[in-house]
Amino acid sequence: VVCRGLYRALCIREKNMQQSLQRFPKTTSQYLRAIEGEPWKPSDAGPVFTPPVKDGQDPLDSGNLPEDLGYHVQMKDGIVYVYADKAAAERNEPKDLPYPSLENFIDDMNFLLVLIAQGPVKTYAHRRLKFLSSKFQVHEMLNEMEEMKELKNNPHRDFYNCRKVDTHIHAAACMNQKHLLRFIKKSYRVDADRVVYNAKGKQLTLKQLFQQLKLHPYDLTVDSLDVHAGRQTFQRFDKFNDKYNPVGASELRDLYLKTENAIHGEYFATIIKEVGSDLEDAKYQHTEPRLSIYGRSPEEWARLASWFNTHRVYSPNMKWMIQVPRIYDVFRSKNFLPHFGKMLECIFVPVFEATVNPQAHKELSVFLRHITGFDSVDDESKHSGHMFSTKSPKPEEWTSQKNPSYTYYIYYMYANILVLNNLRRQRGMNTFLFRPHCGEAGALTHLLAAFMTADNISHGLNLKKSPVLQYLYFLARIPIAMSPLSNNSLFLEYAKNPLLDFHEKGLMVSLSTDDPMQFHYTKEPLMEEYAIAAQVFKLSTCDMCEIARNSVLQCGLSHEEKVKFLGEKYQEDGPEGNDIRKTNVAQIRVAYRYETWCYELNLIAEGLKNE
Amino acid sequence: VVCRGLYRALCIREKNMQQSLQRFPKTTSQYLRAIEGEPWKPSDAGPVFTPPVKDGQDPLDSGNLPEDLGYHVQMKDGIVYVYADKAAAERNEPKDLPYPSLENFIDDMNFLLVLIAQGPVKTYAHRRLKFLSSKFQVHEMLNEMEEMKELKNNPHRDFYNCRKVDTHIHAAACMNQKHLLRFIKKSYRVDADRVVYNAKGKQLTLKQLFQQLKLHPYDLTVDSLDVHAGRQTFQRFDKFNDKYNPVGASELRDLYLKTENAIHGEYFATIIKEVGSDLEDAKYQHTEPRLSIYGRSPEEWARLASWFNTHRVYSPNMKWMIQVPRIYDVFRSKNFLPHFGKMLECIFVPVFEATVNPQAHKELSVFLRHITGFDSVDDESKHSGHMFSTKSPKPEEWTSQKNPSYTYYIYYMYANILVLNNLRRQRGMNTFLFRPHCGEAGALTHLLAAFMTADNISHGLNLKKSPVLQYLYFLARIPIAMSPLSNNSLFLEYAKNPLLDFHEKGLMVSLSTDDPMQFHYTKEPLMEEYAIAAQVFKLSTCDMCEIARNSVLQCGLSHEEKVKFLGEKYQEDGPEGNDIRKTNVAQIRVAYRYETWCYELNLIAEGLKNE
């Protein structure tokens, strides 16, 4: 019964990942087919990433955009449907694309909800995880010196020059506090008399703005800037959000950390480009900053794309993501939105339209080429009270002031990304991964929803509360971008962070900074993150390089770049896929991981054989 | 009785510090005089530091050296005596300088040995320390926001631009592993055909040397370099020492990390100058690297001074120290030395001679201007078995193969520094602080010996094992340079480090890196040290700036520089001595420290009143 449950859970994820053109590991698929007695066929479903720009090519080139398909897009029950034209929409005859079924999803979800609470399944998962921990410790004792020997004999490659990706970082906090401070001072030296602020029709120069705030930038310090998380923010996500306001002044946040303001987000763009240029100098670090789409107005996309193109906010070491804050309730209470469906419409319809007719949305189409995924963000510890079911109001009927639940948000984002990805693949365009914040706090259902819908997640702390989900994340090798320094300031003391435990068990963890502005002290926040983890958890070089390799596998870098950074066969599971000359991960380690993983998958297969 | 004991202990330290021209806090002196009913007079005994070079002045200028005094110096019973001439030496009529008395020292030591083991004294100290902890926590709860407000309103100064000194670092490991690796590769690109090695008369070029080692520098990585401390070094100081050999090859250590080799230490000098130049760029960081004098031959000083002068190893952000490894037993077993007295002679006589006749030892005299203190180094966990007493053999009689005890070493270093300092002050020259490694491991007697003799110490971990010594270090405000990352690799897990506990109680702790090559990952090791402490211990900005201020107070920077970095009155205890505009330490904090300290001193005074 236990094995049957785990088997079905994996099948649910496999189906959802394939439908939405996200990733599911080949090895797990092979075991699932073997259980079914079916032959395994390589799937052609998978994400499409924009290849890197070639020499001499303009990354923001808007020539060569595909022609208009003339399709009509329209939202129905919270999901965007694509029609040949308006008439087809009226006849309710959508184009032939996979559309998600709410009923199936709820069925699957209810099945999984029961599964993760079942006693025998819990016991089984708990025992297997404990076994995985002990097994790794034995592996270390036996093979640590061997792993090290492999790495010592590996020429030219070490932790410093193997690639690492900051898999979870918010653009508005991607610089450190000292960088922001320096930038503010510099801008004042250069731009004091420039009109930079427009409040209620009144125009203010930078000088006047600071006078109004009773501040002189020369005197500004990181203390008065006050963007760093301190002891005050622990368990206080609300206080933490205020830290985005330099000197507690939302005017400065608007001016320096926003894309829309009187200077069209120029300062923000410049800061980000400085961060990008530092990364290019450091060469081996990449980052995946998130920009916000709020879903308050359908123009947001066009404005964001215009900001991106105008200021040419491009760096080869950056891959962009879109984060959607779950703040329908805020917009609704201010009457900005009539219902939740409208929010979804603002988020997704513009992207569909640009996909159908790129020529008419040139800037957005170019911008979308550089977007690799969607994130869903907000304080997970807020409880919504709503239980997602087939009886839940449809998004267009969700007119109440209350915020929908995490799962509700996640489902509708996933559902739209699913349709969108299939449409974009048909057009030869890049697709998007769904990579929500998940399991930083709040209910276990969050992790369950992500298991069903997300290519990978950020945080995942709460996996330590559910052995079944943790084991499923292990079996499906779902990448988890962890940020122990962020957690240390907000939710969990450093030494208690499950990063080491997850890593030892073989979950696919990477390290990320989340918000360097708030959490880090040095000029290289990602290195700081790795250094502290290495020191506190006593990670070996092999551990660190394995985590770095995970980060490249998890991220939205293109196939071509991954080949360059990880080796030709990076898509193969097991030692075959590891090129030690590029990754500096010992083959002994990769072999151990692969054998251990196959052993666990095989246990399920064996368990089902006797049925 | 308890108070009498503590009072006498403090008097012992006061006397020894004043005699040796080291520091003892004014406030403690004032309380001691009050107890005695004596008026307090400011003491003129104290260290003399070389003032910073003025613009246009050459820091290595050897003009203007004082003339020859014609004195004769000669060691007797392990201590260098100064005579008007050889005849005076034969008459045993030394010049009028304070010479230490071994009998008094042993008396004092025996008194302290009894004191720290007395039940009532232990109880008293333990209770007071516990009280200090709780008191600080209450202070924090009440005043944390106020302290922060003070700092926010403090213009232009924050943690990044307040001065911090790396108070404990070894020159041979002052670069990080990546820096050393880069340097080795660079040297090969430039110098492949240069003769750099001289082994048994055979000369090798850099190329030949690497061929002999079967290595190509291009393939070299930080893994194969293998200088970083890993899990293997925990509790294994012996293995740690091997980490000084790049690629495990002592040839490379000789070539890149030594002052004496076929290229006269040029590479080592260049690396150090690169570290210095990085510090100058960063502006707010200083460092106090230790160079070794082994005491194996009297020529060591001249050779080291020649290296320093030839390569102009000078940086305004570096203050130099001399470390003496406690490895008499190694030299004796190889018959390099006839007895321990010879080792002391090699260490101290050349310095006396250069002090008496600087013109005849120009390079050394210039070098000594930049030396601010002596350190005593080695693995403290090795037990010697010898118990220092009046019956111990005199250094000249110490011919056995066994190593003298820590205390024996410490006493004779202290005794010679005492005479030397007084002689140098008479000549208007700079004096030296005694700053041994102490309490990293081993017996409590180490910390007791340092209490009697050292201006300040490195490590001090074992203070957590003796409440009486810990309380005495608190009362006498003895600075402790702590290196939790080093400890984490060698002796004590990070989270168990007493740094936070000591800091809360009000012991004067600073942060230092010890060996960036072995322990650190980033380009700014000292910032890494602060960042990790801040994250793991959740230090506030005020805490960090207080620790940074402690580091400046502790170090060997000149009076002029301390005035510049800490404010005019930095020598005053209490809030009067704190210039928040320079230190960014809240006055509330300094006032709290001062009141708390005076309260404890007053308790002793009150306790003695009733006698």
Image (cartoon, coloured by chain):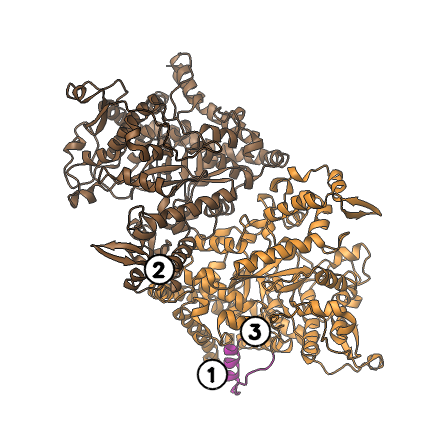
Chain colours: A orange, B brown
At label 1, the amino acid type is Lys
Q: What whole-number distance in Å separates the C-alpha atoms at marks 2 and 3?
A: 40 Å
Whole-percent x and y of residue B400? 14, 39
- Report in which chain the residue with disc 1 lies: A
The foreground one among B256 and A569 is B256
Residue topped by disc 3: A559
Residue extent of the magenta highlight? A23-45
Residue, disc 2:
B192
Q: Within the magenta stretch, is there residue B260?
A: no
What secondary structure is marked by label 2? loop
On whether residue A44 falls in the magenta region, the answer is yes
Q: Are marks 2 and 1 in contact (CB under 8 Å)?
A: no
Label 3 vs 1, first from the N-terminus: 3
- In the image, are marks 2 and 3 on the same chain? no
Amino acid on which the number 2 mark rests in the picture: Ala
Indicate the chain on which mark 3 is placed: A
| Residue named by callout 1 | A609
Q: As drawn, is B262 to the left or to the right of A256?
A: left
Quarter-wise, where is residue B12 in the image? top left
Residue B225 placement: quadrant: bottom left
- What chain is tagged by disc 2? B
Structural distance between the alpha carbons of marks 3 and 1: 37 Å
Q: Residues within 10 Å of mark 3 (few under 14, many from 20)?
A: some
